[in-house]
Amino acid sequence: MIEQLTIPTPAGAFDAIAAGPGDGRPVLLLHGFPEAGVQWEHQVAELGADGYRAVAPDQRGYSPAVRPEDPAEYGIAELVGDVLALADALGWSRFDLVGHDWGAAVGWWTAAEHAARLRTLTAVSTPHPAALAQAIRTDEDQAMRSAYLSEWRQTRATEKRMLANDAEALRRMFEWKVPRGHVEDYVLRLSEPGALTAALNWYRAGRPDGEAGPIEVPTLYVWGTEDVAFGSTAALGTENWVTGPYEFRMFEDVTHWLPEEVPEAFTAVLREFLATR
C-alpha cells in the first residue's frame, strides 16, 4: 500500500509517498526534472512489499511548502542538505539512496560528501558530475547534448515556451516513454503558479563550489543507451570516479526515462543490488 507522507524539516514540509514497514531497511528515492516523487511509485510499492521502508519525496521546489523564490536557494549544498534533513526527520542514521536525473546528481554529491550516512548509492541516467564535466569539455557529442542548459537558465522565457499550447513542449520531453497518467500529473503540478520556475531554479542556482569527489560507498549506475541527455563518454567514464564497489548496468534501446519506461526490469536490477549489500 502506498502512503502519503508530510515530512517536516527546518526548510519546510516535504510531501512524499512511502511503503513498507516502519522498521524496514530505509531507502530514499529522489526524482528528477520535470517529475515528482510519484516517479518511483512502482519501485516504492515493490520495495515496500519486500520489507524495505521506501520513501520518495517531492524535492525542493516541487513540494509547495518548500518553494523558495531565490534561485540561489537551489544550490547543491541546499539540495544535499535536504537529503540529510529528510533522513534525520525519518529517524534514519544510515540509508540506501536512489536517484534519477537531478536526483542522481544530488545522490552523487551526497555520497561524495557524506559517505558515512549511506549504505549504498544507485544513480540512474546521470553520470558522476566530474565525469560529465570532463565529457562536456572533451566530447563534442556530450557538449551538444548539454547545450539545452544555457536555454533553460533564461528566466521566464523557458517557462512560457514549455507551458504553451497545453504544455506541449513539456509533454514531448517525455518522448512518449512515461506512463500517460504520470505525465498528466507532472504537467498539472508544474502548471501551478511558480512551480515550473522553482523546478528550473535547480538549473539557475549556479555551479557548485569545487568538484564532486570520488565515491567510496557501494554504487550502482544504470544508463540507457538511448538517453538523449547523457552519452556514452560520460557514462563509461563514471567508473573512474568510484573507488568503492561498483556496478554498471546498461539498458539497450532505453531512454532517459528508464525507471518509468522499464519499471519491472529496473526494479529487478535494484533489488538484486540492494540484496547483496
Image (spheres, rainbow, N blue to C red):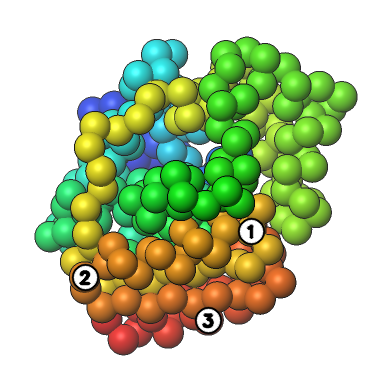
Does 42 appear above or below 141? Answer: below
Which circle marks residue 227 in the picture? Answer: 1
- Residue for badge 3: 268
Name the spot of residue 133 as percent of width and height, x first: 40, 46
The answer to which of 106 and 88 lies nearer the viewer is 106
Instruction: Residue at 34% x, 51% y: name it.
Output: 130
> Is residue 183 found left or right of 204 in the rendered image?
right
Q: Residues within 10 Å of mark 1 (few under 14, many from 20)?
A: some
Crowd class of label 2 (few under 14; some 14 to 19; many from 20; radius 10 Å): few
Give the quadrant of residue 35: top right
Return the x and y of residue 158 as percentages of the image width and height: 66, 21
Marks 3, 2: nearer the viewer: 2
**Closer to the camera in the image, 72 or 59:** 72
- 37 relative to 207, above or below: below
- Residue 189 vertical position relative to residue 193 in the rendered view, above or below: below
Residue 203 falls left or right of residue 169? left
Q: Secondary structure at mark 2?
A: loop
In the figure, is residue 78 to the left or right of 186? left
Q: Which kind of residue does numbered mark 1 sit on?
A: Asp
- Secondary structure beneath disc 3? helix
Pick whichever of labels 2 and 1 is earlier in the sequence: 1
Q: Quadrant of residue 18?
A: bottom left
Answer whether residue 234 is visible to the viewer in this image: yes
- Residue 29, given in percent of the width and then of the height, sits at 42, 56
Query: How far separated are the C-alphas under marks 2 and 1?
Result: 25 Å
Q: In which quarter of the view is residue 215 placed?
A: bottom left
Between the residue at mark 3 and the residue at mark 2, the CA separation in whole angstroms equals 25 Å
User: What number is the disc on residue 243?
Assistant: 2
